[in-house]
Image (tube, rainbow, N blue to C red):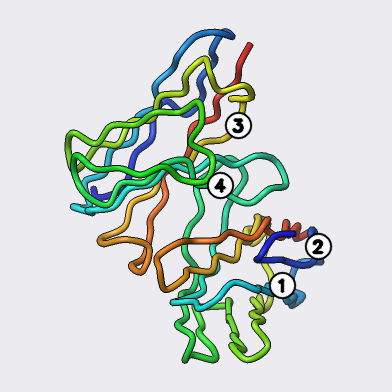
Amino acid sequence: DGGITQSPKYLFRKEGQNVTLSCEQNLNHDAMYWYRQDPGQGLRLIYYSQIVNDFQKGDIAEGYSVSREKKESFPLTVTSAQKNPTAFYLCASSPDGWNTEAFFGQGTRLTVV
Amino acid sequence: KNQVEQSPQSLIILEGKNCTLQCNYTVSPFSNLRWYKQDTGRGPVSLTIMTFSENTKSNGRYTATLDADTKQSSLHITASQLSDSASYICVVILNAGKSTFGDGTTLTVKP
């Protein structure tokens, strides 16, 4: 069953803790992306990766980190430096950059308690 | 000011009625324009993808139009169903590969 999987669906974190969100795809896509979605706002790009072992900052990278050690995996770490981490996080992948169709995961809702 | 503006922000219609959502953009040059449907608490799902040379693209009851001269796109939903209740997002992809998302239109279809 091909697709892009995010886990967990819901995540709670105490202030000051780092937390890692998982994103896995078995679509053999080269490019992967992380977005943040806040209520009533458009998706904002956090990080993206066009190829294994390479990634670039998006528009709101501060307080986040990523790795791309494997083609199928692109985990996002929300660090304690992110001042307002409560949000809905979406991972996406595409065959070869944004000029090819992107597929989204089901999202992870992170709440800081 | 968002470079991709969607209107209305929210819309309520009765089941069976048609509706049209608007997307105006200022970014250029663009590679393609996409409409996504996002159910509450889920990831967006692609409805249509149009290049700058295409004027219209259909996907079942969804029809997207594009006027590259006026930089406007619309998404028309025919014979709405309760399952059409969702947020509809317009995305403009630039030639350089950067994507710009609209804030979305929240559609509620009532019985």
Q: Would you name the residue on which mark 3 appears?
A: A87
Three-letter amino acid code of the residue under disc 1: Leu
Numbered tag placed on residue B21 in the rendering: 1
Q: Position of residue B26 (x, y in %)?
A: 65, 74
Q: Position of residue B40 (x, y in %)?
A: 62, 44
Q: Which residue is mark 2?
A: B11
Q: Is residue A3 above or below residue B109?
A: above
- Label 1 sits on a secondary structure element that is strand
For the question of whether residue B96 can be seen, the reply is yes
Q: How far separated are the C-alphas under marks 3 and 1?
A: 26 Å
* Secondary structure at numbered mark 3: strand
Mark 1 to mark 2 CA distance (whole Å): 9 Å
Residue linked to disc 4 = A44
- Crowd class of label 1 (few under 14; some 14 to 19; many from 20; radius 10 Å): many
Residue at 51% in and 53% down: B44
In percent of width and height, residue A77 lies at: 40, 24
Q: Nearer the viewer, residue B39 or B23?
A: B23
Q: Which mark is residue A66?
A: none
**Chain letter behind tag 3:** A
Amino acid, disc 4: Arg
Which amino acid does the dot numbered 2 rest on?
A: Leu
Q: Amino acid at mark 3?
A: Ala
Q: Chain of mark 4?
A: A
